[in-house]
Image: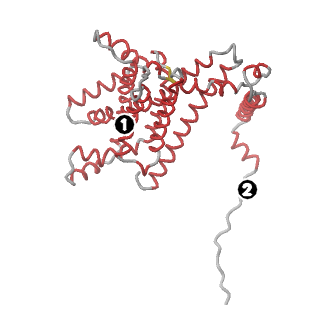
Amino acid sequence: MTLRIDAGPKPAEDSTPIAERVAALVGSPFNAAVSLAVTLLVGVVAWHFLRWALIDATWSGGAEACRTQTGACWPFVRVNARLMFFGVYPEWALWRAELSLALMVAVIGASMAPPLWGWQLALAWALTPALVCLLLSGVFTSTPVATNDWGGLPLTVLVWMIAFAGSFVVAIPLALARRSRLGGLRTAAVVAIELIRAVPMLVALYVSRFIVPMMAPGLEINLFVSVETALVFFVASYLAEILRAGFQSLPRGQTEAAQALGLSYFHAVRLVLLPQALRAVIPALVNLGIGILLSTPLIAVIGMTDFLSAVRVAAAQEQEWPRCFTVAYLFAGGVYFAVCFAASRYSRWLERRLRAAGHS
């Protein structure tokens, strides 16, 4: 007896004509013409950019070598790298800025590994900015450096790190007060959040730097302290709404289960509600972090030299370095893009990892 195995029905072949597939892809002749025109335009722009940035560019030599070429002058980046990365920080104390940047990058890098999440990492986020401030100011040496001389990428990362981490300290109580059943507490939280969110960041910086000292005559406020205070409260107002959305996304059964276990309100929030709320709003947290980073150049308006300001100072050498203005800002844009793109990709990876682990 011969055993016959039925392989199932034969899949139907796609008999859709090629013309219909093309029509479905491009839509109408007008849409096809627009798509073709845009593609050609992008191709022409990309070709000219690549020719300027790579083919006709100068890769070695100095300013004189760039004068004979029509492309980008990349030796400018090599020669002015110290100025662009560290700003006006004294060259004789450059090791402090380098060590500070390495410490902050190490803590941020460790934060991207979920197995390292814990109270030790939270303590590192609290202590590292304080250690960096002491290191940059020269407390451990006999030659102090004023905060007005801090600058470049270390200042940008430090401002971002304090603003982002410090905002959690303010935003979590605000978000909980916003959801409170106590009418007075809830109203106060709403007023505080909406009042801060109703003004641009630049206005908050001006108020912290100029208006607050006028309200307290004789009070001398450090420029760096005033900037960070304004940023912490400004970012916290947005973060509070993000966290509130995270809390509201949780099923009511989570709160009831915590109460059934005999957990106090504080322990229920810390152990049950807050971790789940943070996981639910990971994309929003990453977007907020990127927004803070891209807004840090605003501190230059009140006298601080961040990374972009240091790039602008380097780009002022247009007479010595031809076409350095475009190269400098292209370099700065590449740095910002690399950081923000890596953050967005990490956010997607973390979402998939937590979903696979059953946390969503």
Residue type at the position of mark 2: Ser
Asked whether 79 or 90 is in front, the reply is 90
Q: Residue 244, percent across and down?
A: 34, 37
Please rate how many residues cluster around mark 1, counting C-alpha atoms within 10 Å: few if below 14, some from 14 to 19, many from 20: few
* Pick the front one: 121 or 24: 121
In this rendering, the answer to whether 309 lies above or below 44 is above
Q: What colouring style does the render use?
A: secondary structure
Q: Secondary structure at mark 1?
A: helix
Q: Which mark is residue 341?
A: none
Residue 192: percent from left, percent from top:
30, 25
Q: Pointer 1 and pointer 2: residues touching (CB < 8 Å)?
A: no
Q: Name the residue carrying label 1.
A: 127
Going by the image, does 122 lie left or right of 21?
Answer: left
The residue indicated by pointer 2 is 15
Residue 34: x and y, percent? 71, 31
Disc 2 residue crowd, few under 14, some 14–19, many 20+, Cα 10 Å: few
* Residue 33 visible in the displayed image: no
Q: Nearer the viewer, residue 335 or 150?
A: 150
Spatial separation of the CA atoms under disc 1 and disc 2? 66 Å
Q: Residue at x 80, y 20 (%)?
A: 68
**Res 260 → quadrant:** bottom left
At horizontal 72% and vertical 42% (from top left) the residue drawn is 23
- Residue at x-position 74% and y-position 34%: 36
Q: Nearer the viewer, mark 1 or mark 2?
A: 1
User: The disc labelled 1 sits on which kind of residue?
Assistant: Leu
* Image quarter hosting the N terminus: bottom right
Residue drawn at the location 44% of the way across and 43% of the way down? 111
Q: How many marks?
A: 2
Earlier in the chain: of badge 1 and badge 2, it is: 2
Q: Which residue sits furthest right?
A: 68
SS assignment at label 2? loop
Can see residue 107? yes
